[in-house]
Image: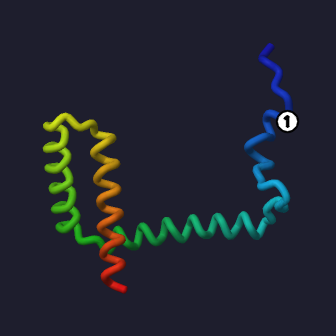
Amino acid sequence: MGKNIKLKTLLEGYAWERTPGKALPTLEDVQNAHNKGQNIKEGNSRMEGLLDQKAWKEVTANVYDIMMDFQADGFETEDIIEFLSEKLKSTIEEIEMEGM
């Protein structure tokens, strides 16, 4: 026979995730969270449709070149990705600040 698992162990971290002192989520809360996720997916799909394929190919070619240069200098792929992600995020924030 398999190992016995206590019911409490099964429930912890799944059905009863909550903040102490806060009520359990209602059906409306769960539906709103689901709809928010759907809206994000739809927004991403719409943005992807608007993205010019030629521009995206140029961006990916440049990122590839940068990654190859960094790897030639001995940097690990994970470190390069983290660096480029942070750089892109800060560049977007700068663009947003200029636009205000």
Q: Left or right: where does residue 14 sit relative to residue 21?
A: left
Quarter of the image where the N terminus is located: top right
Q: Quadrant of residue 4?
A: top right
Q: How many residues crowd around disc 1 within 10 Å: few (fewer than 14), some, or many (20 or more)?
A: few
Which residue lies most toward the bottom here? 100
**Disc 1, SS:** helix
Residue 91: x and y, percent?
A: 29, 67
Residue 12: x and y, percent?
A: 78, 40
Q: Residue at x 13, y 44 (%)?
A: 69
In this figure, which residue is indicated by the disc labeled 1? Answer: 8
Q: Nearer the viewer, residue 10 or 88?
A: 88
User: In the displayed structure, would residue 34 be above or below residue 63?
Assistant: below
Quarter of the image where the C terminus is located: bottom left
Q: Residue at x 35, y 78 (%)?
A: 96
Tell me which amino acid carries mark 1.
Lys
Q: Nearer the viewer, residue 76 or 32?
A: 76
Residue 71: x and y, percent?
A: 19, 38
Q: Left or right: where does residue 11 sit relative to residue 55?
A: right
Q: Residue at x 24, y 71 (%)?
A: 52
User: In the displayed structure, would residue 8 be above or below residue 58?
Assistant: above
Q: Left or right: where does residue 76 sit relative to residue 40?
A: left
Q: Residue at x 78, y 48 (%)?
A: 15
